[in-house]
Image (cartoon, rainbow, N blue to C red):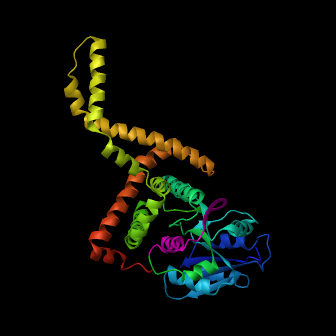
Amino acid sequence: MGRMLKISVIIPVYRESGLLSEVLNILLNQNIGRNIYEVIVIIDEPTKCSLDILRKYDNEIKFIINKKRVGKANALNEAVRQSSGNILLFLDSDIMIPYDKFYLKKIIEEMEDTDILDIKKEVIKNSFLSRMTYYEYVGFNIGSWFVSKFVGKCPAVNGSAFAIRKDVLTSLKGFRRVITEDLDIAMRAFLKNYKFKYTKQVIVYNYVHSNWKKWIIQRKRWSIGCALWFKEWYRDIFKICIRHPSTYILSLFFLFPSIVLVLLYLFIPKLLIHKLFSLIFLLLAVKLNFILPVLWLSTISIDFVKSSLASILSFISFSIIFFILSKKLDFKFKLHEFLIYYFFYSFLGLFIMVAALINIFFFDKEAEKIISDWKI
C-alpha cells in the first residue's frame, strides 16, 4: 500500500467491564510502534472501578467519559471522530483477546486487501448455556467464512469484534442509532460494494450469559433488532438471496439449523413414507409367517415416523457438515453437545426470532413498548 496503515482500537463500555484492564494490558504490549496504533475507551456512566482503570492508564490510553448514557451508536461515533487511525478495530467490553504481541499487526496485514474484516469469535465454555452458545457462534463463523469465500461481500457482521477502514465508515456516515448497529453498517457497506473478509488468523473470546433469564432478555433484544433490520432491508435482502441463493440461504441454515428440520418435516411426502413402511411391514409379515395389521400400524404411526425420519436425516447431515467446517475453522466439536444444541437450543433461538418478526411486522405498537427503554 502507498501509505502506512495506523489502527485505532475502540472499546465502548457501559458502566464497567471486568475484562477491560486485562485487555488493555495486552494491547499496550504489542510488538509494533506506538505511532502505528492507539487505544480509545469510551465509557457511559462510569463506576468507581472504571474511573480507577482510567487513572491507571490515563497517560497511555485515550479515555472518553460520558457521565450520562448516550447509547452505543453515539459512543462509537464520538470515538471515531476522535480517532487518528485509518483502520478502526471495534471490540466489545465483554470479550477477551489472546496474549499475542503481534495481534494488531495481524489485523493490519489482514486489512490490506479488504474494507471490512470479520474476526473469528469463540465462546468460552464455562456453563451449560455457554456450551450451547458455543455452537451458535460456530454457526456465525461458518456463515461469515462461507460468504467471504464465495461472494466477498456480506450484509451482516457480528459487532463484538470487527475492523473497518475509517474512510469506508465515513462514507457511510457512521453508525446509525438502531439496536443492531453492526448489522446496519454491514448492510449499508454491502450495498456500496465494499469488500468483506473473514479471518481465523485473529481471534477473540466471547464471555456469554450463564443465566437463562439474562440470556432470554439479551436474545429478545437481538431478535427485535434483527427483525427491525429485516423490516427495513427485506427488499434488498431478497435481491441478495436471488443473486446468490446457495451461499446466503446455506448461511442462514448455519445460523438456524432447526430450519432444516422444520422444512424436512413439512415437505417429506406422507404418501411415500406410507408406502415405504407398508411394504416393510408386509415383508415382515411374510418373513415371520404371521399377519400384521399393516395399513393400520403404518397409518397411525405415519406422523411419528415422518418427524423421526426428518429429525434423524437432518441431524446426521448437519452433524457431518458442522464437524467438517468446525475443524476447518479450528473449532472443537462434541457430538453430545451438538445434539442438545440442535434439538433444543437452536429451536428456542428460532422461536424467539420468529416471535420477534411477528411482533415487528404485525404489532408495531407492542414492539415500540419493548424497545422504549433501550438506549440506542
Query: Magenta segment, which residues?
Result: 179-204
Q: Which of the image's four quarters has the N terminus?
A: bottom right
What residue do we see at 76% from left, 70% from top? 30
Displayed quadrant of residue 96: bottom right
Q: Position of residue 231 (x, y in %)?
A: 37, 71
Q: Nearer the viewer, residue 11 or 357?
A: 357
- Nearer to me, 23 or 261: 261
Q: Residue at x 47, y 41 (%)?
A: 317
Q: Position of residue 141 (x, y in %)?
A: 56, 57
> Toward the viewer: 337 or 169?
169
Q: Can residue 48 be seen at all in this image of the molecule? A: no
Q: Position of residue 106 (x, y in %)?
A: 72, 65
Q: Is residue 188 magenta?
A: yes
211 vs 35: above or below:
above
Quarter of the picture holding the C terminus: bottom left
Q: Is residue 52 visible?
A: yes
